[in-house]
Amino acid sequence: MATRRFTLHLLAAACACMLVAPAFAQDAWPNKPVKFVVPFAPGGSTDVVARMVGQKLSDLWKQPVVIENRTGAGGNLGAEMVVKSPADGYTLLFASGSVAINPHIYKKMPFDTYRDLVPITNVAQGPMLVVVPDKSSYRTLKELVQAARDKPGQLNFGSAGVGSQVHMAGENFAHVAKAEIKHVPYRGEAVAYNDLMAGQIDLMVGNFAAASALVGKDRLRALAITSDKRSPLLPDVPTTAEAGLPQLQSTGWFGLFAPAGTPKAVLDRIHRDTVRVLGETEIKARLYVQGMRPVGNTPGDFSKALKSEDVHWATVVKERKLAAN
């Protein structure tokens, strides 16, 4: 009888261990390095913000946060890599607005953005800058717009790739300016700036974080900022409204996504810790210097914002007759 009772106690203990094991496993996350897949080249705004936040999360998690740049197809190659990774929280996508754009611009998507990716949070966002080479003859936005109208198809703009938010900001500029401007895609924002500074392309509507760092003699000239007020970092640069193009409003944002099926406890941990990091004075200051502000919204609010952008970009892509592959 005693032996039977002992056996029953052992079985009960074993069942209890089985029930709490998943909780312990989730509490232990992360117990190895976490990878942030950045779908654009090093040096661009997405990469800069990912490394900034990744370092802080690495300190918090006591595990390395490794940045892997997987470029191509306007961010699709990097996103596809994440979608095909195990849904365990160890491979995350650190993406830009291209996530909401690509489903409309690419005829063949290798995955379903809204089925295969889970939004975690919008990390940071900021305005964009209309920039030209410092040696450009265009000194104001009005001069640039007039030249684009007078020479249809002769001016060109660079981007971080087809479908990137830099690409769409450029298309939006052409649309609002009522001008035909040729798009020249690159495999990253930083690569495009190199050619812009060299005068190989005429203009870009780039993320403030990357573009503002290059504004200066023999590099880039900023003609306007796509926000409703001037930036204290570039106080002499007018808003697009002040420069004569009030309809041109563009915002660059950068957010975290996980593969669908990632355990909720892990997603909650990533969200909670990311928001905690974004609340640090140091991160706020570093983002401010980049012309951005931290967001850290809920997954639900981030999802709603994505759906709103989805509708907006569907309209722009249709009106501009844009398509890839």
Image (cartoon, rainbow, N blue to C red):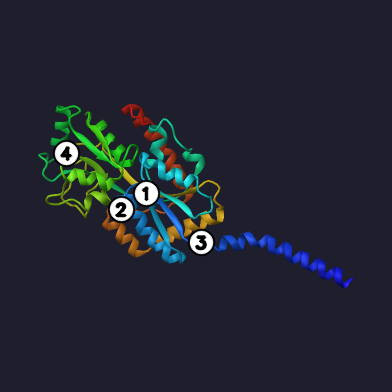
Label 1 sits on residue: 254
CA distance separating discs 1 and 3 = 23 Å
Q: Nearer the viewer, residue 148 or 248?
A: 148
Q: Amino acid at mark 3?
A: Pro
Residue 1 lies, with reference to residue 229, above or below; the image says below
Which image quarter holds the C terminus? Answer: top left
Give the number of the disc on residue 292.
2
Q: On the picture, is 224 further left or further right than 84? A: left
Which image quarter holds the N terminus? Answer: bottom right
Q: Amino acid at mark 1?
A: Phe
Secondary structure beneath dot 1 equals: strand
Give the number of the disc on residue 141.
4
Could you tell which of marks 3 and 2 lies nearer the N-terminus? 3
Label 3 sits on residue: 30
Q: Nearer the viewer, mark 3 or mark 2?
A: 3
Q: Nearer the viewer, residue 142 or 87?
A: 87
CA distance separating discs 4 and 1 = 27 Å
Q: On the picture, is 244 further left or further right than 324? A: left
Answer yes or no: is residue 227 visible.
Answer: no
Q: Nearer the viewer, residue 108 or 54?
A: 108
Residue pictured at 38% horizontal, 35% vertical: 312
Q: Position of residue 281 (x, y in %)?
A: 34, 64
